[in-house]
Image (tube, coloured by chain):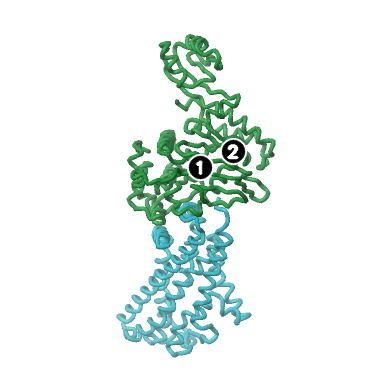
Chain colours: A cyan, B green
């Protein structure tokens, strides 16, 4: 298994998509952070919504942009398996590891690893941004680091679990475009609708589950809402979020192993 | 350019230390594959002997690729078994070191370099990365190791496939149409390589629809048409059992004299006829047989070639029988056969 993992890591390292995902993660995190932190307030309402610069809430808002890493970890997980079918490298892959369950297990672990890398990339960008803001005279180091510590672990954990979830989606759907559309579509389109109509179901969906995981910071910082962060009361607990995300990934991957991946490779 | 010719230099450590215990084997028993209502392979049974090159022949759509993919665990048989060294491919303890496979539709990530492509496979099998450069050198891609595969020509990709197959220094080579996309030099090289590989006691199963090409490489043949086994055995033996004749084309300034010499020395075997002013076609013989006769009669020879027509005749005779079993592709049989034939190189190209 260690050899398989080494090979999977090498595969991810040697395609440009991985590096593109890391760069996009950093650019989005940094860019959005600056944008959100310094958005001009034209109306009183906005001024109420956006916390004053340098406050804990403001840092929390700026660091919340690290959560874009989560979606990119999902994309990496999807590519990890669907890329093999897209470029037909699945044939040599299965020739050297003909046991398909083992192949999927290795990819599941390497996608989780990919999630760590993406999460760390986003996290480091956030940290650099935070240091830059403090150096620029916005807030003090202690407050910045406190908020950073609140946001980062949740984001990192969500990245790992989304990597696994993406792998599961890819293993089941096999087609790269379909898997990406379904994966991101569920989060961006389906979930808000379900959330609006049946919130009791919606909060168990992947996007909300990730939010529950990421919101550890919010509840832990004893602010319980306010500012742009609405109440997190509607969310499941962070560990429920973690478990449900892990379940999505593993169930989909196992289903994929027994359906699509068992199919003939021609 | 493929340059390496001293193949033994490139054999891996294991081969040199000769750690191979029992002789490698490939065996197919009652192998059947249905794709929906189409029977791609029907109750196929044959075994491949080590120490020789076995040709897996049949027209396009005969079921060759499906059979090979079942052998490699990529396609699940509807029934029957395909075994390598007595076990299913999926149960091989070390597949990369046991079987090397060259497959047509095998893929490469276009943005990955040739070296990294092979490294991803070497990593799984625990093969030293130094071996990657060794096999790339062997197939003549040493200078292109750092280039991305997306920029490779068809022939270069085919050579990279071969390099991948050889990475684990396997005992069994399975090749699906390896000549595709290769230049004549590459084809000659692969022919030599397969002969060398088989001669060291290994198993070589090579599919082809190019009959004239295959005739020059293979010892044994397995002939497939419409998913049915049409013939299996040593090529020479199969040829004797049919009306197909071996023929040799000789270019000589003494054409008329050669004909009379041949008629005098071998009246029983076939006939010799004049094809052009200086070309004689002698049927029912081989270069090995008439070479000494011509030397003895002091006949000047400019050129002598095996025509390879014999195998094609054998092939058509055998595959025509398959017509009665019904053609699954829904195409007239003749058109499929003609396709395979038309793309074969003209017999003149083959040299003995």
Pinpoint residue B21: horizontal percent, then vertical percent.
Answer: 41, 46
Q: Which of B49/B147 is in front?
A: B49
Are labels 1 and 2 on one chain? yes
- Answer whether residue B181 is visible to the viewer in this image: no
Q: Nearer the viewer, mark 1 or mark 2?
A: 2
The chain containing the residue under callout 2 comes to B
Q: Residues within 10 Å of mark 1 (few under 14, many from 20)?
A: many
Q: Which of A48/A144 is in front?
A: A144
Pinpoint residue B182: horizontal percent, then vertical percent.
Answer: 45, 38
Left or right: where B142 falls relative to B208: left
For residue B304, which quarter of the picture? top left
Q: Which mark is residue B224?
A: 2
Q: What residue is rendered at 49% in x and 69% in y?
A: A164
Q: Residues within 10 Å of mark 2 (few under 14, many from 20)?
A: many
Q: Is residue A210 above or below residue B92?
A: below
- Answer whether residue B198 is visible to the viewer in this image: yes
Mark 1–mark 2 Cα distance, whole angstroms, equals 14 Å
The chain containing the residue under callout 1 comes to B
Q: Earlier in the sequence, mark 1 or mark 2?
A: 1
For residue B311, which quarter of the picture? top right
> In what quadrant of the picture does the N terminus of chain A appear?
bottom left
Return the residue found at the far left. Answer: A135
Q: Is residue B326 above or below residue A15?
A: above
Q: What residue is rendered at 48% in x and 30% in y?
A: B216
Q: What residue is rendered at 35% in x and 79% in y?
A: A130
Query: Is there CB contact under 8 Å for labels 1 and 2?
Result: no
Dot 1 falls on a residue whose secondary structure is: strand
Residue highlighted by disc 1: B176
């Amino acid at each position: 298994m260690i050899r398989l993992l080494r090979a999977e890591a090498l595969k991810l390292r040697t395609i440009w998509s991985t590096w593109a995902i890391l760069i996009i993660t950093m650019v989005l995190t940094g860019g959005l952070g600056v944008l959100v932190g310094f958005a001009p307030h034209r109306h009183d309402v906005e001024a109420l919504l956006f916390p004053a610069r340098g406050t804990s809430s403001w840092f929390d808002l700026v660091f919340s942009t690290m959560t874009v890493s989560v979606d990119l970890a999902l994309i990496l997980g999807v590519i990890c398996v669907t890329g093999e079918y897209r470029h037909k490298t699945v044939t040599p892959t299965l020739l050297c590891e003909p046991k398909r369950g083992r192949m999927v297990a290795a990819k599941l672990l390497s996608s989780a690893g990919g999630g760590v890398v993406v999460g760390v990339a986003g996290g480091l960008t956030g940290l650099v941004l935070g240091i830059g803001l403090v150096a620029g005279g916005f807030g003090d180091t202690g407050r910045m680091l406190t908020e950073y510590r609140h946001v980062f672990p949740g984001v990192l954990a969500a990245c790992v679990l989304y990597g696994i979830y993406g792998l599961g989606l890819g293993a089941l759907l096999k087609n790269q475009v379909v898997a990406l559309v379904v994966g991101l579509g569920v989060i961006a389109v389906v979930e808000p609708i379900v959330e609006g109509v049946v919130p009791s179901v919606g909060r168990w969906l992947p996007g909300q589950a990730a939010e529950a995981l990421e919101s550890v910071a919010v509840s832990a910082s004893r602010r319980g809402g306010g500012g742009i962060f609405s109440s997190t009361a509607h969310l499941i607990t962070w560990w429920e979020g973690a478990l449900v995300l892990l379940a999505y990934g593993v169930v989909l991957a196992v289903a994929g192993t027994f359906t699509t991946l068992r199919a003939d490779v021609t | 350019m493929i340059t390496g010719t001293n193949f033994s230099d490139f054999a891996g450590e294991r081969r040199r230390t000769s750690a191979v215990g029992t002789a490698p084997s490939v065996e197919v028993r009652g192998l059947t594959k249905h794709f929906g209502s189409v029977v791609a392979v029907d109750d196929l049974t044959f075994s491949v002997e080590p120490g020789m090159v076995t040709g897996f022949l049949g027209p396009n759509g005969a079921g060759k690729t499906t059979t090979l993919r079942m052998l490699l665990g990529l396609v699940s048989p509807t029934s029957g078994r395909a075994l390598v060294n007595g076990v299913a491919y999926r149960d091989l303890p070390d597949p990369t070191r046991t079987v090397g496979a060259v497959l047509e539709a095998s893929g490469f990530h276009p943005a990955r370099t040739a070296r990294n492509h092979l490294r991803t496979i070497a990593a799984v099998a625990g093969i030293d990365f130094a071996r990657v450069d060794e096999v790339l050198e062997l197939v003549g891609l040493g200078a292109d190791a750092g280039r991305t595969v997306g920029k490779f020509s068809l022939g270069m990709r085919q050579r990279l496939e071969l390099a991948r197959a050889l990475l684990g220094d396997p005992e069994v080579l399975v090749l699906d149409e390896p000549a595709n996309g290769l230049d004549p030099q590459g084809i000659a090289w692969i022919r030599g390589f397969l002969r060398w590989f088989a001669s060291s006691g290994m198993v070589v199963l090579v599919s082809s629809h190019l009959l004239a090409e295959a005739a020059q490489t293979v010892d044994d043949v397995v002939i497939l048409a419409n998913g049915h086994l049409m013939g299996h055995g040593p090529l020479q033996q199969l040829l004797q059992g049919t009306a197909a004749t071996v023929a040799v084309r000789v270019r000589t300034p003494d054409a008329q004299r050669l004909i009379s010499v041949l008629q005098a020395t071998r009246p029983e075997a076939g006939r010799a006829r004049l094809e052009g002013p200086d070309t004689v076609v002698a049927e029912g013989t081989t270069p090995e047989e008439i070479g000494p006769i011509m030397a003895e009669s002091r006949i000047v020879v400019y050129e002598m070639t095996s025509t390879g027509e014999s195998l094609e005749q054998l092939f058509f005779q055998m595959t025509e029988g398959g017509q009665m079993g019904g053609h699954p592709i829904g195409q007239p049989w003749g058109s499929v056969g003609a396709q395979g034939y038309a793309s074969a190189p003209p017999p003149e190209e083959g040299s003995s």
